[in-house]
Amino acid sequence: MICGNHLICGKIFQSTTFKNMKTKIALLILFLSGNLFAQEQKMTAAEIASFKEDVNVVSKKIKTLSTDFVQYKHLDFLSKDIETSGKMLFKEPSLLSWQYKKPYNYSIVFKNGKILINDEGKKSAVDIGNSKIFARINKLIVGSVSGNMFDDKEFTISYFKLKGQNLAKFVPKDATLKKYIKQIELTFDKEEATVLQVKLLESSEDYTRIVLKNKVINAKIDDSVFTN
């Protein structure tokens, strides 16, 4: 079709182009939304029961755990996350050591009801028993490492399926704890039923994401490792 009126043709072209753009944008949004929902799907009651059973069976077998980690600290006012890395060691029932190696040397040990801190030679200690909030945080951290923290009394828990992974979201019921930690997200390997990633969301928009890799389960770990 040949149009003799350039003004009318221009308007028709613009209108057609705009409609096509709207259609494409709508399809793009639909596509992205579909992908988003496909990535994170709620588990059924049967799937939740099976998942919890798998994790509990594996966590009971874990006597020691050694793993490298990379930690990403997201602060709302910074354009780039703060990245640190090191090694984490766990020994049942509740010995836990976080050894930061890069970009600085810093270690935190949870032992005998205390938090022992070594900041490049400067040592300090906090008695967990003097603070209910520290006691709860300690329980959270140990539980998140071992995967043994499905406590409906302490948390409102929701469960999701991802590709090759499972995701559990924990919202504290305790109002005091909620002031510090808004939500904990644990990502599990679907086959091994062990924790791959821990994400702690604070009451602000800030969060800490810890990725665990090169895990070694039930290798011998000497108690001296937990001396800070």
Image (tube, helix red, strand yellow):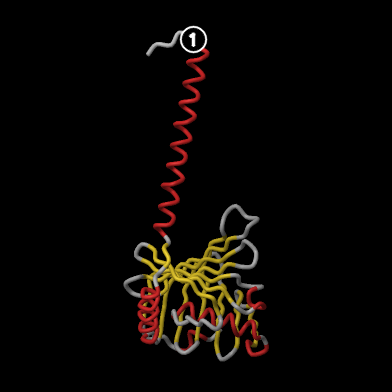
The picture quadrant where one finds residue 111 is: bottom right
Nearer the observer, 120 or 65: 65
Q: Position of residue 169 (x, y in %)?
A: 50, 70
Q: What is the quadrant of the C terminus in the image?
A: bottom right
Q: Is residue 213 left or right of residue 99?
A: left
Nearer the observer, 134 or 24: 24
Q: Give the residue drawn at x 40%, y 79%.
A: 52
Q: What is the quadrant of the N terminus in the image?
A: top left
Q: Using the image, determine if residue 174 lies above or below residue 212.
A: below
Q: How many marks?
A: 1
Q: Position of residue 57 (x, y in %)?
A: 36, 84
Q: Position of residue 34 (x, y in %)?
A: 41, 52
Q: Using the image, determine if residue 69 lies above or below residue 89.
A: above
Q: Position of residue 203 (x, y in %)?
A: 64, 67
The picture quadrant where one finds residue 207 is: bottom right
The residue sitting at the top extreme is: 4
- Amino acid type of disc 1? Asn
Q: Is residue 57 left or right of residue 227?
A: left
Nearer the observer, 53 or 222: 53
Instruction: Give the residue number, with chain letter if any, for mark 1.
Output: 5
Q: Give the residue drawn at x 41%, y 53%.
A: 35
Q: Secondary structure at mark 1?
A: loop
Q: Give the residue drawn at x 35%, y 79%.
A: 54
Sort mark 1 into few (<14), some (14-19) or many (20+) by Cα contacts within 10 Å. few
